[in-house]
Image (cartoon, helix red, strand yellow):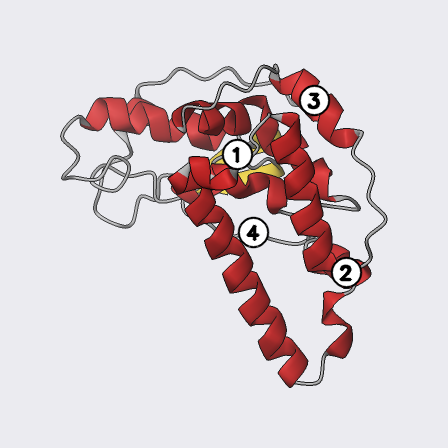
Amino acid sequence: SAEMCVLRWHGNTLHQVLHLVLETAVVDALADEGIKCGHTPKSLLKELNAIQLTEQNGMQYLEQYFQKFLELIRIPLLDTYPSLHNHYLSFFETAHKKIARAKSDGLELIEGIDNFKRAFRPRSGITISTIHGIKGAEFDNVIAFSLLEGLVPHWADPKPNDIAKKLLYVICSRARKNLFLISETARGKAGTSELVKTNYLYDTVP
């Protein structure tokens, strides 16, 4: 959930993940909980990046970091916000269970901070996902297929044109360099109408 995104790990340090989501997600999630953050996304990111911890146990690092985060947004007691508190408890309960299972399999070093970094390091290769699943992510190359009427938008959507526009926006805004939009012709369905009626500008190939 957005409320717990500060507890994810990305790259070499915990708080680097905020570069992906902090622009709106964290501040918006806090607002949804009735929490007035008092920071802009950029100023909050700056404060979070300044947090320094020496803890080498991964789970304890996460717990300490989250406490620093609560202090930063001036929440003295987490249980003042039941929904946020439940997310916190659920996250750590699940994480501790997974670590316990790993240790029972002989992975005694699983709790070390270096193992946490490796586990959440960005992966290379191909990511396969639904349209909804890539919200908030970015890729150099995006290939979207099955952009067909009845699928995008789904035939049961009450406002198909509006839904199609939103889904196409999600797809197109994920690509940093190259974008491929594919409507197959052999499946007996027409291409997504919002895509078909779009005029495209193409570079001249020498």
| Amino acid type, mark 3 | Pro
Give x and y (percent) for residue 138: 59, 35
Residue that carries the numbered disc 1 in the rendered image: 136
Q: Position of residue 38 (x, y in %)?
A: 58, 14
- The residue nearer to you, when weighing 139 against 103, is 103
Determine which residue is flagged by label 2: 57
| Alpha carbon distance from label 1 to label 3 | 36 Å
- Nearer the observer, disc 4 or disc 2? 2
Helix, strand or loop for disc 2: loop
Tell me, yes or no, whether the two marked residues, 4 and 1, touch with CB atoms within 8 Å: no
Whole-number angstrom distance, CA of label 4 to CA of label 1: 14 Å
Per the model, the C-alpha gap separating discs 1 and 2 is: 29 Å
Q: Residue at x 50, y 18 (%)?
A: 36
Q: Which residue is mark 4?
A: 127
User: x, y percentage for residue 129?
Assistant: 46, 49
Residue in the picture at 64% in, 42% down: 66
Q: Nearer the viewer, residue 27 or 83?
A: 83
Residue 180, compared with residue 106, is above or below; it is above
Q: Which residue is mark 3?
A: 206
- Residue most extreme to the bottom: 105
Q: Amino acid at mark 1?
A: Gly
Instruction: Tell us which disc is closer to us: 2 or 3.
Output: 2
Please, what secondary structure does the residue beneath circle 3 have? loop
Viewer can see residue 160: yes
Q: CA distance from mark 2 to mark 3?
A: 57 Å
Query: Closer to the N terminus: mark 4 or mark 3?
Result: 4
Which circle's residue, 1 or 3, is located before the other in the chain? 1
Question: Which sits in the foreground, 113 or 121?
Answer: 113
In the displayed structure image, the side of residue 181 where residue 204 appears, left or right: right
* Alpha carbon separation for disc pair 4 and 2: 30 Å
